[in-house]
Image (spheres, grey):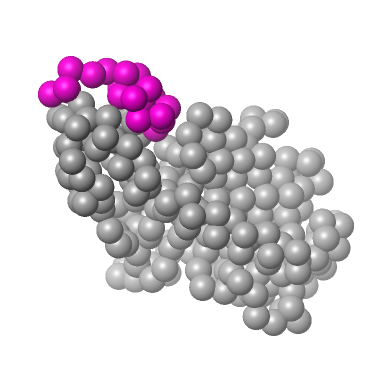
């Protein structure tokens, strides 16, 4: 991802002979947040940019040239992956596919085999390995706290073979029964709900503001704006209130896995 904005901020900070810590103190931000902006992993909110302008005496330069719009998913993927590693809480909403961080090898392989335009086996296999690497954060028994809210379509849309689907669903069952994650299913009979537009990942951190990540067709968006993140958090909470409780969700997962041929 191009990091013109982050480089620009770093140059202005160094020209003012300030460390990241000193700039963070002046702008009422954390040093790690400044570091993420300079590295291109985060985009400051408009309020953060305004405070940076005041702290650096740059007028409204940093506020006026905030990056806008969506970028290709691949351009944001590495940043999102790094942020996942630092998050203390992650809440995922899946509209069509199981969240990447919860995918099994077989499911990820089948999903990426259907990519368009097609990719080589080597590229596909590297992407599968990368996706499985993301899941290693769940090896920690406590952090991050992980919730997954699934539209029922995720369970019903076959990806790969019936065996792949059964394995994928039971993977979530095992993580849930081990109390490592919480899973809630939004059944079809709920009808319309606030999360029908795209997938969503919400992340909270110890020392920096929360953020959201959304994906649409061929484009991803990392959202830092406090008001926008809060709105997405509220939409998630509203949809969650319509979802099946944990026990009923797990029962539906098991029944669906059985429909796909899982026995046990």
Question: Picture quarter containing residue 260?
Answer: bottom right
Q: Is-magenta flag for residue 7?
A: no
Of the pair 88 and 180, the residue shown nearer to us = 88
Residue at the (55%, 60%) spot, across then down: 231
Q: Is residue 193 left or right of residue 15?
A: right
Q: Residue at x 42, y 51 (%)?
A: 225
Q: Position of residue 157 (x, y in %)?
A: 61, 74
Q: Nearer the viewer, residue 112 or 77?
A: 77
| Left or right for 63, reference 184 | left
Q: Is residue 176 above or below residue 116?
A: above
Q: Considering only vertical position in the picture, is 168 above or below 55?
A: below
Quadrant of the rendering where the C terminus is positioned: bottom right
Magenta highlight range: 14-33
Q: Does the magenta stretch include residue 32?
A: yes
Left or right of 2? Residue 224 is right
Task: Tell me, yes or no, if residue 108 can be seen here.
Answer: no
Q: Choose top left, top right, bottom left or bottom right for residue 55.
A: top left
- The image position of residue 33, as x and y in percent, is 39, 32
Q: Is residue 14 left or right of residue 101?
A: left
Which residue corresponds to the image point at 16% horizontal and 30% vertical from the top-left?
Answer: 12
């Amino acid at each position: 991802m191009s990091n013109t904005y982050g480089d620009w901020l770093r140059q202005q900070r160094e020209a003012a002979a300030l460390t990241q810590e000193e700039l963070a103190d002046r702008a009422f931000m954390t040093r790690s947040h400044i570091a993420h902006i300079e590295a291109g992993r985060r985009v400051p909110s408009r309020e953060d940019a305004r405070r940076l302008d005041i702290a650096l005496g740059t007028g409204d330069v940093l506020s006026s040239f905030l990056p806008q719009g969506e970028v290709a998913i691949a351009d944001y993927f590495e940043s999102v992956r790094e942020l996942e590693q630092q998050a203390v809480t992650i809440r995922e909403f899946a509209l069509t596919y199981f969240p990447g961080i919860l995918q099994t090898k077989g499911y990820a392989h089948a999903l990426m085999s259907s990519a368009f335009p097609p990719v080589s086996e080597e590229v596909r296999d590297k992407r599968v390995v990368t996706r499985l690497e993301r899941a290693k954060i769940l090896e920690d028994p406590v952090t991050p706290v992980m919730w997954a809210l699934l539209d029922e379509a995720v369970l019903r849309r076959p990806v790969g073979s019936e065996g792949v689907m059964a394995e994928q669903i039971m993977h979530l069952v095992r993580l849930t029964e081990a109390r490592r994650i919480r899973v809630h299913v939004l059944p079809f009979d709920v009808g319309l709900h606030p999360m029908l537009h795209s997938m969503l990942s919400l992340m909270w951190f110890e020392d920096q503001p929360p953020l959201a990540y959304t994906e649409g067709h061929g484009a991803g968006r990392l959202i830092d704006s406090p008001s926008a993140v809060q709105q997405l958090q509220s939409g998630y909470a509203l949809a969650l209130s319509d979802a099946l409780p944990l026990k009923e969700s797990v029962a539906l997962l098991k029944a669906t896995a059985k429909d796909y041929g899982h026995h046990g």
